[in-house]
Image (cartoon, helix red, strand yellow):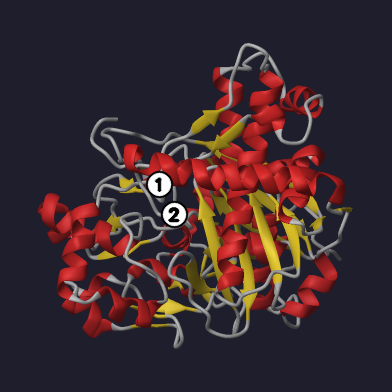
Amino acid sequence: MNTYLLGIDVGTSACKVALHRADGTVVEQAAGEYSVFYPHRGWAEQNPKDWWQALCVASKTVIEKSGLQPGEIAGLGVAGQSWSAVAVDGGGNVLCNTPIWTDTRARRECDEIIGRVPEETLFALCGNPVQPSYTLPKILWYKNERPEVYEKSQSILQSNSYIVYMLTGRITQDISQGYGLCCFDVRKGQLDLPTAKALGIRPELLPELLPCHRVVGAVTHSAAKATGIAEGTPVVAGGLDAACGALGAGVIDPGQTQEQGGQAGGMSLCINRYAAAPRLIMGAHVVPERWLIQGGTTGGGGVLKWLKETICPELTFGQMDELAAQEPAGSDGVVFLPYMAGERSPIWNPNASGVFFGLNYAKTRGHLIRAAMEGVGFSLRHNLDVAQEAGAHAHSLQSVGGSANSRLWTQIKADITGHAIYVSVSDTATTLGAAILAGVGTGVYENFVNARTKTVKITRMHEPNTQVKPIYDTRYAQYRELYARLKPIMTSDVQ
């Protein structure tokens, strides 16, 4: 008899649900889309109830198409986008839309935080700088700007913990999402409640942090009716989408690095010792006794999606690949800064803007597409360089996300970074990581090494092309200099 595990991924544009066999293969998958709202400059928010409705539709579709009896699913895990601040009252009702990871409205609250507790003290505790996109500044924003929401709030949840609550009725938060709270002791994996109080929030708003593979509850009767998942199915705490994607790609050993090719870009470098870097993100891995040095960027697969919607609406992504492949490495001098929603690491500038440089009448859509791909590759290299400066060295890259389906884009990233890139699963790495957490938590797998052995299969490898290295070294230097020169304009009030 086969054993099945359900993985859920609460992404930025859609909630993906995939039913996996114990060997990692996908039986069925479906997704439900929803909107991001941009009511003001610097704001980006979603309605968590939209996540739930999308999950209900997608999970019913998956279970019906699979032909399985719901009771054959051994457990489920939920991965989620980072840095939400889902305010719920005592009845679990959502009180307002939640700011998501690209939202930077809480800039003044960052100044307030640093005024209460010195930034160096917070960095020593949680291994991360204070940023407006993180969760705790958003909580303070509620307190300052939406006091009625703050006062009614019983708990502040992350995207995956909100879905876990809707499935089980249990208020939880996983350890891999703790670093966005600023009062998280990353070495101990615990919240520092006195620091939370010193920062001006009610500590009781923050749920206890739990291991990502811990079974926290079971699917309730009402959730079973809404989702089609059997009542009583075990649910684990789940984790950060990037960390689950890293697990789904087999990244559990020091030096292994996930290359993220979803809506956002970046990397997650696995380490087995504390090594924080001020310009990067430091968090607990979903795997115990492991951490991730992360480089999170706003420009990833979303850059190509934007190009398709605005400049190439009649083309498929495959046809865009073909156009880009016709242009040489370096795009004949076109350089792209992929800062399409401000930028996170390593520049941390919410006012950073996307830029095409080097255009003239001879340039084509192919140049723009290839330059966009290369710009995302340069942002990956920038994060890897900063990690190396901090003493964290990438040995190999494991590529995940929809962008990994593009052989051209994956090869470009290998050529730019100088690292071999391995591809196992691409679109389903994150749901697989969530499913693995459920499998370890319910005993389907003996441990995480056993789970990786059974589920992760490398399908192709991209070796760097040393012949184009001088070209990309030159363009990368231009990429870095372009931002340095444009930064004063980007951060002015002229935009």
Q: Is residue 23 left or right of residue 409?
A: right
- Is residue 75 visible in the rendered structure shown here? yes
Residue 121 at x, y = what percent?
Answer: 29, 81
Mark closest to the chain's N terminus, 1 or 2 = 1
Q: Is residue 363 left or right of residue 212?
A: right
* Label drawn at residue 102: 1
Amino acid at circle 1: Thr
Q: Residue at x 24, y 50 (%)?
A: 95
Q: Nearer the viewer, mark 1 or mark 2?
A: 2
Residue 410 at x, y = what percent?
Answer: 76, 45
> Few, some or many C-alpha atoms within 10 Å of disc 1 (few <14, some 14-19, many ≥20)?
many
Mark 2, residue position: 347
| Distance Cα–Cα, label 1 vs label 2 | 14 Å
Q: Residue at x 54, y 60 (%)?
A: 295
Q: In this view of the protein, which residue sits in the foreground, 253 or 1?
A: 253
Instruction: Name the quarter where the C terminus is drawn.
Output: top left
> Few, some or many C-alpha atoms within 10 Å of disc 2 (few <14, some 14-19, many ≥20)?
some
Q: In this view of the protein, which residue sits in the foreground, 73 or 403?
A: 403
